[in-house]
Image (cartoon, helix red, strand yellow):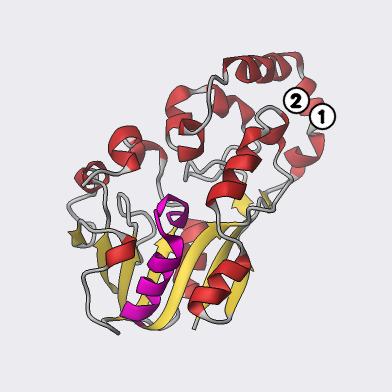
């Protein structure tokens, strides 16, 4: 079985640590579920403690990086979950749906195996307020192509609730927007390797050079001064919860 992260996921666990504030929101969204299926589980981030978690992950590289204390994992895809109907109290999928080859089928499968809630952390493809796009405008096009809108979730899961997930300024999970108040981090190729968006861009050496120059000259700080006083910021991430 091949998967994107077999190629780009080396050292993934180093930069994609679960942020406790985001984890708390996910845990709350799961409600009283005792058994949870984690779909597209990666290296095990955000698998809640105190619940019986089963993980599904297609990438052998991601499975290799899972800690020995992580939940038991089965190598499989979201589109073909190897479980009977209503096998779990809840199903969760954290920043993974944009990698699925058939999002509608994957959502349908999550609904099938969960007798309770389905909880998904995703990103609004219509969001347009991240300064990195001033240097790399292609990131909006990538999101538009790969991220489902809220109506897509409704059509597969029934009525859903969307809960904004603001990103802390010192977020320890290296998602695309994690470094919104730490711009120099985007100059680090290892940091960029933690976000699949960068793997879908072409040659970005010139935009990154411009960013580096703006940081050094103080232009970045002048242009985005309003961000520097904020502890957290909304960048379009949200929890989608279906009962």
Residue that mark 1 sits on = 223
Provide the secondary structure element on which disc 1 rests: helix
Q: Residue at x 20, y 56 (%)?
A: 75
Q: Main secondary structure of the magenta part?
A: helix
Contact between marks 2 and 1 (CB within 8 A): the answer is yes
Q: CA distance from mark 2 to mark 1?
A: 5 Å
Q: Examine the rendered structure and indicate whether residue 126 appears above or below residue 172.
A: below
Residue that mark 2 sits on = 220
- Residue 111 is one of the magenta-drawn residues: yes
Residue 153, quarter of picture: bottom right
- Residue 10 is one of the magenta-drawn residues: no
Please indicate whether residue 218 sits to the left or right of residue 108 in the image: right
Q: Residue at x 27, y 68 (%)?
A: 81
Looking at the picture, tell me which residue is in the foreground, 233 or 170.
233
Q: Where are the magenta residues, as a range? A: 95-114
Disc 2 residue crowd, few under 14, some 14–19, many 20+, Cα 10 Å: some
Looking at the picture, tell me which residue is in the foreground, 175 or 171.
175
Provide the secondary structure element on which disc 2 rests: helix
Q: Position of residue 104 (x, y in %)?
A: 45, 66
Q: Position of residue 200 (x, y in %)?
A: 49, 33
Q: Position of residue 1 (x, y in %)?
A: 20, 47
Q: Examine the rendered structure and indicate whether residue 183 appears above or below residue 242.
A: above
């Amino acid at each position: 079985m091949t998967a994107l992260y077999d190629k780009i996921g080396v050292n993934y666990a180093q930069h994609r640590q679960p942020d406790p504030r985001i984890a708390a929101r996910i845990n709350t969204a799961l409600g009283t579920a005792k058994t949870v299926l984690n779909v597209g589980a990666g290296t095990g981030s955000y698998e809640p403690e105190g619940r019986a978690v089963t993980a599904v992950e297609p990438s052998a590289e991601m499975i290799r990086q899972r800690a020995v204390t992580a939940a038991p994992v089965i190598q499989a895809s979201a589109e073909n979950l190897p479980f009977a109907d209503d096998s779990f109290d809840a199903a969760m999928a954290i920043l993974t749906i944009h990698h699925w080859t058939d999002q509608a089928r994957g959502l349908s499968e999550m609904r099938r195996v969960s007798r309770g809630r389905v909880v998904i952390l995703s990103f609004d493809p219509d969001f347009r307020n991240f300064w990195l796009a001033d240097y790399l405008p292609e990131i909006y096009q990538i999101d538009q192509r790969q991220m489902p809108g809220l109506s897509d979730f409704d059509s597969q899961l029934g009525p859903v609730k969307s809960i904004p997930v603001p990103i802390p300024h010192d977020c320890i999970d290296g998602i695309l927007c994690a470094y919104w108040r730490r711009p120099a981090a985007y100059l680090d190729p290892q940091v960029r390797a933690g976000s699949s968006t960068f793997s879908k861009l072409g040659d970005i050496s010139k935009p990154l050079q411009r960013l580096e120059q703006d940081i050094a000259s103080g232009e970045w700080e002048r242009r985005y001064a309003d961000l520097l006083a904020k502890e957290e910021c909304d960048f379009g991430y949200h929890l989608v919860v279906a009962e």
